[in-house]
Image: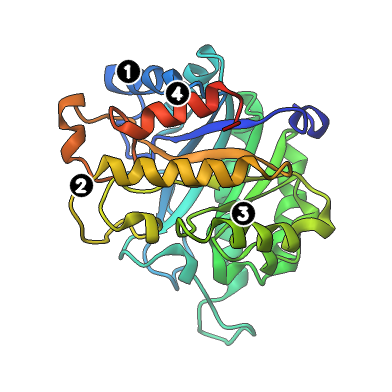
Amino acid sequence: MNIEQFNKETVNGMTWGWTGVRGTWEGSDAEFSMKAMTALNVNWAALSLGALQATAQSTTISYKEEPTVTDSEVRSAIRRAKELGLKVCLKPVVNCADGTWRAHINFFDHEVPGEPSWSEWFASYEEFILHYAVIAEEEGCEMLCIGCEMVQTDKREAQWRALIAKVRAVYSGLITYNCDKYQEGNVAWWDAVDIISSSGYYPIDEWEQQLDRVEASIAGYKKPFFFMEAGCPSREGSPQRPNDWSLPGAPSGVEQDRYYKAMFEACSRRPWMQGFMLWDWPARLYAPQDAPQNDDYCMYAKPAETTVSEYYGRGGAV
């Protein structure tokens, strides 16, 4: 797929398989999950896997051992998605094993002898991303997401540009970077990627003003845009803080559905907004009868499932 082809379609997508725990991407549960996901009228799947570094100041990313899914699992999931008629975005993501959010990965701006450095970290990150770029090329993935919500790294423009150039040497598909919410205007190297994407976890009553801000932030790049992540837990209070997966509150499919309807209505009025890779759809689903007690992001067997299916079925129109 080239950029001209991408510009002619709407991304009716779902993020599948997070966090990519070894052993979960193959087998009957994974096959059932991905097949069930297609009932939402999706045309794209973001296959999202996680690899670990020990802390936010570590410089080694471990992706060849547990808990990260094996290369065989990654290839199997890509092929399964394609057999189901889906376009694929491969999305390798780094997490910190100690629980620190990846947005806080950071080092001194100027290297100090004996201290961990940006150059050491980017060398490991480059190895990690290029490994999956090769798999994405060999398996025919239409898109590769080269990073996710890495706020403190965004300022390292030269290193990101160098990485993107190396990715293009081994991968011929579309390249995007998933910046964090509120960061769309803080990435100076959007011109180097094919598509701008971000995490759209905005409060239910702020969609209009945030879309105005995003539009102004990216207008000068003349690049397509979609939300690589967006969604809301099925939990009371979550529509106001959809990015907070730990927010206390009773399970509520009604609240999740209310958020989706508001988000879709606001975004459908913006012709420059090309769609979503909604968050998220696990490789192992809970039983349908347990949906009313489930307060996570997945909308399987919840009211929002119908809302998403109908919205996607209309091609992203309210």
Residue named by callout 4: 40
Label 4 vs 3, first from the N-terminus: 4
Disc 4 to disc 3, how far (Cα)? 35 Å
Is label 1 in contact with label 2 (beta carbons under 8 Å)? no
Residue kind at label 4, given as amino acid type: Leu
Residue named by callout 3: 126
Residue kind at label 2, given as amino acid type: Pro
Residue kind at label 1, given as amino acid type: Phe
Residue most extreme to the top: 83
In the rendered image, is residue 252 in sight?
Answer: yes
- Depth check, mark 1 against mark 4: the one in front is 4
Q: Is mark 2 on a helix, strand or loop?
A: loop
Categorize mark 4 by other alpha carbons within 10 Å: few (<14), some (14-19), many (20+).
many
- At a point 33% along the width and 55% down the height, the residue shown is 238
Label 1 vs 4, first from the N-terminus: 1
Instruction: Judge whether 199 appears above or below 272 on screen.
Output: below
- Depth check, mark 4 against mark 3: the one in front is 4
Label 1 vs 2, first from the N-terminus: 1
Instruction: Judge whether 162 appears above or below 308 on screen.
Output: below
Can you give x and y, in whole percent of width and height, for residue 124 in the image? Answer: 55, 58
Residue named by callout 2: 251
Q: What element carries label 1?
A: helix
- At a point 72% along the width and 67% down the height, the residue shown is 157
Left or right of 316 on screen, residue 185: right
- Depth check, mark 3 against mark 1: the one in front is 1
Nearest the viewer among 174 and 206 is 206
Residue named by callout 1: 32
